[in-house]
Amino acid sequence: MKHFISVIKKFVVVHKVITGIIIILLLFGGYKIYSSLADDSGETQYTTAAAAKDTIITTITGSGQVSAPDQTDVKAKVSGDVVYVGFKNGDTVKTGQLILQLDTSDAKKSLRDAQISLDQVQLALEKMKGLSTEEGNIRGVKEKAVEDLDSAYENGFNTVSNAFLDLPDVMAGLQDVLLGYNLSDSSQQNIYYLYDAVYPYNANVYTFKNDAVDSYNAARAAYDQNFIDYKATSRFSDTIAIENLIEETYNTTKLISESVRDANNLIQLYKDTFTEQNKKTNSTADTYLSQLSSYTGKANTYLSSLLSSKTSIQSSKEDLIETNFDIKDQEIKVTQAQDNLDDVQDNLNKHYIYAPVSGVITQITAKKGDSVSASSIATIIPTSRIAELSLNEVDVTNIKVGQKATLTFDAVDELTISGTVSEVDSIGTVSQGVVNYSVKIVFDTEDSRVKPGMSVNAAIITDIKQDVLSVSNSAVKSNGNQYYVEILDNGDVSNQMIEIGLADDTKTEIISGLEEGDEVITQTINGISQTTNSNAGNGNFMMGIGGGGMPSR
């Protein structure tokens, strides 16, 4: 190196003129390069973009782990002989499906006896109402009206109770027919199997499928609420509550009847289409049609009975004039008899053991003819998966049950699963001064590659707006609490005040101040090739929480 430097020095000393020329050429070349990069005119240039309609989605992201719900023990609440077993170890079961039934002979006899006892004390009460008149032993019109109305309410509530002995089975059956997997050997839900099978030959199946889905959802929503109201009402509730329950059950039964009809139509279309195409149908379809036929008969029977109860109550109310007889002692006996009937009915219901959750049946040992006691008869291991995240106190304020989320997994490349927020902790945990809240997301679909304990990344959608006017975030500038964009008009730049709404990582919604197609400045290029985003340097353009964008005004 020293030798090299010595040679250079020697060259400079000996060739002074040549060295000077080289220095001049280097300076001149550098100047030309600088001039070519710089704008000699000093004119500022702008990049613009048009305001356009777009979709803006804000999300909050977090990471956590995959978990599975705890296994559930299925227990018999009474002892008895097994007369039906619907599943075996390894079978998949859905919530509400009948797993096992015990012999109900004795329970039904006890129910009949309890009903007879109730009828007897009620008859005695009715006689008291008819004989305790001021005019002696002649039953008055007023007392007869009271008796008729009481009987109408009683019969109406009994009709509702009888309906709810069958409606749970009907709804469970409908769920199995439409949402079960028997037609495709557990690879596809029945309703989509039927749709895919028929569509190549008859496009009308699209309407049939949608009708079946819509009517089932309507029936399911009505039934779930009706069942809650039924459990909250007894025959001793006030008359308004009983009337409302009868009316609600009547309307629910109509919706269930419609759902049964639409399910039947879809399966019948499948059979007719395959017959026309000389294709063999799945034999399970015939089983389903037979089930649906029986459901139709049950629904029509209860519709008739409930309508009769409504009419009877209305007629009795019109004829009623209140009475003032002292019949408290006999009413107590009726109450006691009714309590006994309810207990016996509850005992009968316990002979039917339904799946409390969906999952895989394990450890079921009972067989038809076995005697079982009030103990565990099976275990259900849930197949569902849950993503458990921990979010800070700022992010969690924007999270609500029911919000949709997108889930990805470090261990399974390119796999994305949608999910739904199912639970948000109301009480946070403090760690090193930071408050975090647990959020659970239920998978909408399952993938066998996803195992409990795996890492999961979630993007929870907190807001979404479609077809809204928007501009690039780089176009939005602020001055205090006001927002504006820059407009280029014949070389002149002017400020246009705007009102903004939702924003994500790249776009901001424009509520007012711009029209679709308006050109706004998104970037400024000055004369020495320095590039500046239109919002750079003002320090006021803030993005939303968790990558979600600018908050709404």
Image (spheres, grey):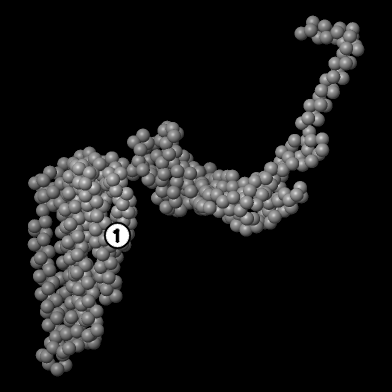
Q: Is residue 176 above or below residue 141?
A: above
Secondary structure state at the residue bearing disc 1: helix
Question: Where residue 529 sits in the image (x, y, percent)?
Answer: 75, 35
Q: Amino acid at mark 1?
A: Ala
Q: For the C terminus, give its image quadrant.
A: bottom right
Q: Nearer the viewer, residue 174 or 268?
A: 268
Can you see residue 502?
Answer: no
Q: Residue at x 72, y 53 (%)?
A: 495
As drawn, the residue found furthest toward the right would be: 17
Q: Which residue is mark 1?
A: 219
Residue toward you, 485 or 548: 485
For residue 254, which quarter of the picture? bottom left
Taking 206 as reference, is 455 above or below it?
Answer: above
* Residue drawn 82% across the image and 35% down it: 40
Residue at the (11%, 46%) spot, across then down:
368
Residue 517: in sight, yes or no? yes
Q: Residue furthest bottom?
A: 135
Q: Residue at x 25, y 68 (%)?
A: 250
Q: Decide which of 330, 419 is in the foreground and name it.
A: 419
Q: Position of residue 461 (x, y in %)?
A: 48, 48
